[in-house]
Image (tube, rainbow, N blue to C red):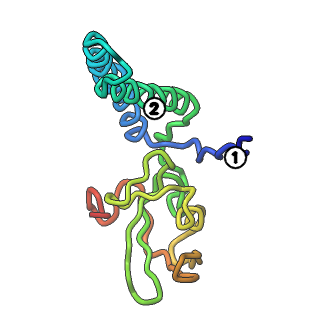
Amino acid sequence: MARYRPPQQSGSRYITAEGAARLRAELDELWRVKRPAVTRAVAEAAAQGDRSENAEYTYGKKQLREIDRRVRFLRKRLDELVVVRDVPQDRSRVFFGAWVRIEDAAGQRAVYRIVGPDEFDPERHWISMDSPVGRALLGKRVDDAIRVRSPRGEIEYCILEIGYESLAGESDPGR
């Protein structure tokens, strides 16, 4: 008997233009470059004879299944995504695409960009709007306090600055 797993809730449907371009580039790379190369490798491995003991054939078929699964996901996801290109009229509040500088009670500062769940990147300090910090920040203004639950307990942050191009003239203030 199979164990029931409720369907996973997909994240928010919003994405930046550059995030959508990255997903399209990944789809193009998988479909036009990787899949044909793996297909050729599987065909060559199959030509060698007995497939039941042919590791290259078995591994290649597994790679094809993984590529096809990702291609199906990307096609479906790209169809349902809403690309946000415009900056909101009210730039004094945190909305999708905003750069936000925050500070905790200990004086530790951080800068985050609020993006969609398909493009978050901790190295670039891009956080998902569906994350606890992202959800808490949305709609807030400078000097507002937010509370976020973390494994260390509840943390309070104060919003110091909001920007939509970048903060303080930096091209990527999270770096």
| Left or right: where 79 falls relative to 54 | right
Q: Are marks 2 and 1 in contact (CB under 8 Å)?
A: no
Is the residue 53 above or below the residue 158 in the image?
A: above
| Left or right: where 78 falls relative to 24 | right
Q: Amino acid at mark 2?
A: Arg
Is the residue 99 above or below the residue 30 in the image?
A: below
Residue 19 occupies quadrant: top left
SS of the residue under disc 1: loop
Closer to the camera in the image, 74 or 171: 74
Residue 89's spot in the image, x, y percent? Answer: 54, 51
Closer to the camera in the image, 156 or 92: 156
Q: Name the residue tied to disc 2.
A: 70
The total number of labels drawn is: 2
Q: Amino acid at mark 1?
A: Arg
**Dot placed on the residue nearer the N-terminal end, 2 or 1:** 1
Closer to the camera in the image, 27 or 134: 27
SS of the residue under disc 2: helix
Residue 92's spot in the image, x, y percent? Answer: 52, 63
**Labels 2, 1: front one:** 1
Q: CA distance from mark 2 to mark 1?
A: 20 Å
Indicate which disc residue 58 carries.
none
Indicate which disc residue 5 carries.
1
* Visible residue check, residue 39: yes
Residue plotted at (27% across, 15% down): 40
Is the residue 109 above or below the residue 64 in the image?
A: below
**10 Å crowding of disc 2: few (<14), some (14-19), many (20+):** some
Residue plotted at (44% across, 74% down): 102
* Visible residue check, residue 28: no
Closer to the camera in the image, 166 or 23: 23
| Left or right: where 6 falls relative to 151 | right
